[in-house]
Image: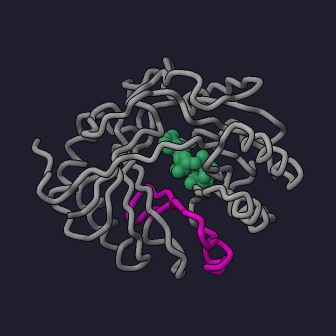
Amino acid sequence: MKFPWNKYEELPLDRRNTLQIFITNECNLRCNGCFARDIIKNDSSYMSLEEYQKVISEFLKRDGKQINLLGGEPLLHPNIREIVNINKKENIKTTIYTNGYFLDRFKPEDLEGVKLRVSLYCKNGKVKSVDSLPLTNIPFDANYMVSKKTNLDNLLDSADYLEKNHKCKVFFISSIRELDNPNQEFFEDTEATMPVLEYKKLVHNFMREYQGKMNVHVSKRGVFESTKTIADNKCKFANYFIGGKIIQCPYDIVNLKFQKSYEFEDRFCQHNNTCLMSKIIFKRK
Ligand SMILES: C[S@@+](CC[C@H](N)C(=O)[O-])C[C@H]1O[C@@H](n2cnc3c(N)ncnc32)[C@H](O)[C@@H]1O
Ligand code: SF4
């Protein structure tokens, strides 16, 4: 399984202090593997702007640089435009993780300067399929979450479609995670998860066959080694939920392991290169 280095070069990661804020528990979907499902269950609340502003003040005191907005579905938040503007005013980079269903409710200028990451499960299917996304002129990065059902043709067709129809510049290959398994073991697969070695093979084959121009980001899942050295593995992530609940490590979200506070660059990463957030960025040569 040789990696096609003739086609790609690895770019260094820009790791910055990042707070993931779950701004709403409202969602139009109930995806099977959703790691936030216990939080969004039977609850349709939205974070108030007052609470949001308070979170941002604390974040800036901790040398925060980037906010990821999640939920539930963040584009359902009635004040999403104001939230984006607060971040802009404070010079904070913003990424919105979204299922993309409501992109056609926005004008490009509403989300200017924001990175959108649209999560997808399949080329055509009932939930989060590439084909059923509304066609808009709002640019986004695609996050294709591989499952046991994914095959190489799905992945290649999806990438071509997204590049042609949505002008995506980034195709992020990640995976439905085995966070759900009874032992909470990273390498223990669930019904939905593609085993790691198959995942590695699929990604290699994709990288070899893919003819388009998008940069490809790949979730490491413990089977992809970076060629770039990271000097330390102190955690730069934390998660904040409505009402002041904090969970530092994304792995703890399914167990609802709340804590009082968070600090960046303080604790060592317990999952190192299997961290949910760890990825490799490949640029097309
Ligand atoms: C909880 S969702 C909230 C944002 C939005 N509703 C969405 O689906 O993109 C945040 C991100 O987690 C991803 N996600 C949800 N469940 C997952 C799982 N079991 N494994 C890996 N990623 C997951 C989603 O696809 C999305 O990219
Ligand atoms: S759309 Fe997002 S938040 Fe909603 S259920 Fe699916 S993964 Fe969870």
What is the span of residues highlighted in magenta in the rendered image? 101-129
Which residue occupies 45% across, 27% down?
233
- Residue 166 colored magenta? no
Nearer-the-camera pick, 2 or 100: 2
- Residue 103 colored magenta? yes
Q: Residue 45: percent from the left, percent from the top?
A: 83, 50
- Quadrant that contains the N terminus: top left
Can residue 250 be seen here?
yes
- Label total for image: 0
Which residue occupies 68% across, 75% down?
110
Image quadrant assignment for residue 216 = bottom left
Can residue 31 be seen here?
no
Residue furthest to the right: 50
Nearer-the-camera pick, 215 or 122: 215
Q: Residue 8: percent from the left, percent from the top?
A: 20, 57
Q: Residue 111: percent from the left, percent from the top?
A: 64, 71
Which residue occupies 67% across, 30% down?
247
